[in-house]
Structure formats: structure tokens, C-alpha cells
Amino acid sequence: MNNTRLDPLVFGQRLRHLRRSRGLTLDALGSRVGKKASYLSLIENGHREVRLSVIEALAGALGVTASDLVVPEAPSRRARLEIDLQRAQEDPLYRDLHLPWIKPSANVPSDVIEHILKMFDELKGRSQVRVESPEAARRANSELRAEMGARGNYFSEIEKAAAEALRAAGYDGSGAVAEGVLTDLMARLGFTLHRVTDLPPSSRSVTDLVNRRIYIQQRNELRTRGARSVVLETLGHFVLRHADPAHYGEFLRQRVEANYFAGAVLAPEKQVVELLAKARREGDISPEDVKQKFYVSYEMAAHRLTNLLTHHFDLRVHFLRSDQEGIIWKAYENDGVP
């Protein structure tokens, strides 16, 4: 099975290509794998993540291997254009044009799609990353929170990336991640850590990309727990291959993903789930236990509960961080709490 990060749009196009090449309708394929046509349609359109068991069932029904389905390449040039068009139309810069959504049916020639994509690329090239209006920032935040709620705040691809990074760095799978493991992980990515006294107050870290150095505050300003998180959030951008954000929504997503990566490394999925399973049986689930066992902050422990409780135990949760004046800085929910 290929360990490449699964792209829902590419997977959906490959599934549609293989299904049509075998002369199967969605209903026919659905009957073979025990799924509704509407469910398969969501997968083919890239609107739903798919579990490994479903991938294997689909591969069997289509007479291919699971690896054939998850190849990270579009099955044809036309499919690649359709994927790029969908991504372009989902871009906030494109949405701001208030153009009607174009569904790339067979009646839309490929050269027309190419013209649209090239014009949009030119538009992006001429648009500088700018400070978004408060309304645009709120919209981007709301859209991202809605997606996080829909997927139970669980990012399987980032969990896998964190697990692979830990294995490569020699984590033995027990308890808190040792400093030596984090140092090895940093070295494998080609970085060194430097504590300084003159970091700008507005910055948690500064990364020198030329010399591959990460600068953070001295210990008297940034304690060990905080330092571990800051360093891993920085490394997360590189492990997850983040490019320079083209707009605020992308910047926001990258921050969420980097934060998620740090949590998934410091409180690994398998070990946290084992702890939570025991706590659930005893009716005593608490962020404090995650905090103590994995040597993370209370906030990160609470984040990990939101990442894992819905996906693994079907428990709905909410998370809120506010200051003493009642200003909300972070919020997440999938349990209906406003």
C-alpha cells in the first residue's frame, strides 16, 4: 500500500476512471461493495475521505490492487485539468470574482479549462498576499472550523506523517517523547536549534532557511513544554510541505495543520487512544491525564482530545480558550454548542 498522502480529488478521479472503464454505474459498483451510490458520488467528487477498508473493497470490485487506486497521479490529462479547475474555483481569490461555478462536464472542452486556469494563475501572480478585511478573515475562519467539525477535527494524513516521523527518529512507543527523539527528528530534517535573547516579541520562532537554523527564546522566556511545541510547529510546515500561503485562508489552514502535527508528535495517536480507551471504560476522561503522561500543555492535551475522541470513540466535544476578559482566542465544536 502506497504511503503517499491521499489526495481526495485525485483518488476520486481515479475511482471514476476505473469505474467507467469497466462500464459500471455508481449503483452497480455500490451493490458490489455494499455502499450507496450517493456515498460513492461524494468520494468521486473529492468531498469525502475514504477508509482503507473501503479502498480495498473498491479495488476488489474493480479488479485492481489498492495501490492502483491510491497512485497520487490523475488518470488522464483531462482529469488533471478538472482537478485543477475545482481547486481554482474553491480559492477565495476566485470566489471574490463572483463567477458562476463551472462543472467540467463532457461539453466543456479541455482547451477552455486550460484558458481559465492560465488566466487565474496570472491573476494570482498579480495579486499580492494582503491583509484580509475582518469580514474575509471571519469567513475563512468559519469555513475552516466547519470543515474541522465535519471531519471530527481528525486529520488522518497528518497523524500518519507524525507517526512516520517518530518511527524514523527512534521513538519506542512508550510514554512521553524524549528530547533525544525530537533532536534526532530535527537533525533528520536538516535543522539545528538555537536559543537567543533578542527574538522579536511578536515571534515565537524565526527560521533561517539558508543555514537551516530555528531560533527560539531563551529558557527563562520559553519553558521546555512551550519550546517543544514551537519547534515542532515549525518543523511541521516542512514535513507537510507547506508553500508560501497565497491568501489568509491558506495561511490559517497551514497554522492549524502545523499545530496539529506538533500535537500528533508529542502525544502520539496510538498511545493516546490506548489511554483514552482505558479512561472511557472507567468513565473518567480528562485532559489532565494526557498532559501528565505526554508532558504537553493543558491546551495541547485538550486539542488532542478533540482530534481523537470523535474519530475513535464517536464522542462529540467542544473546546474553548478565552482570556480573563472573556475574549475567545480559540474555539472548536462538533457537539452543537454555539
Image (cartoon, helix red, strand yellow):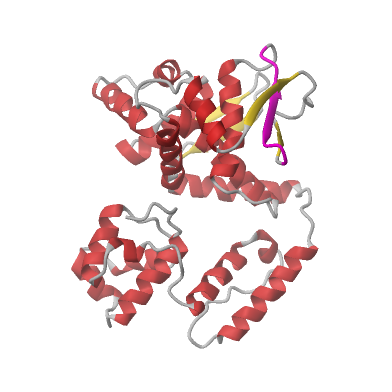
Q: Is residue 192 left or right of residue 161?
A: right
The answer to which of 268 and 215 lies nearer the viewer is 215
Nearest the viewer among 137 and 82 is 82
Residue 273 drawn at (x, y percent):
33, 30
209 vs 181: above or below = below
On the question of residue 118 being in view, the answer is: yes
**What residue range appears in magenta?**
210-219
Q: Is residue 26 magenta?
A: no
Q: Is residue 54 left or right of residue 135?
A: left
Q: Is residue 318 visible?
A: no
Total count of labels? 0
What's the residue at 51%, 78% (across, down)?
Answer: 77
Q: Residue at x 40, y 35 (%)?
A: 167
Residue occupying the far top of the picture = 220
Depicted 148 relative to depicted 66: above or below: above
Measured as percent of width and height from the top left, residue 313 is found at 30, 36
Q: Quadrant of the N terminus?
A: bottom left
Residue 18 in which image quadrant = bottom left
The answer to whether residue 163 is left or right of residue 261 is: left
Residue appearing at x 37%, y 20% in the figure: 175
Q: Position of residue 182 (x, y in %)?
A: 51, 27
Residue 193: image x %, image y %?
Answer: 64, 26
In the image, is residue 214 part of the stretch drawn in magenta?
yes
Q: Quadrant of residue 56?
A: bottom left
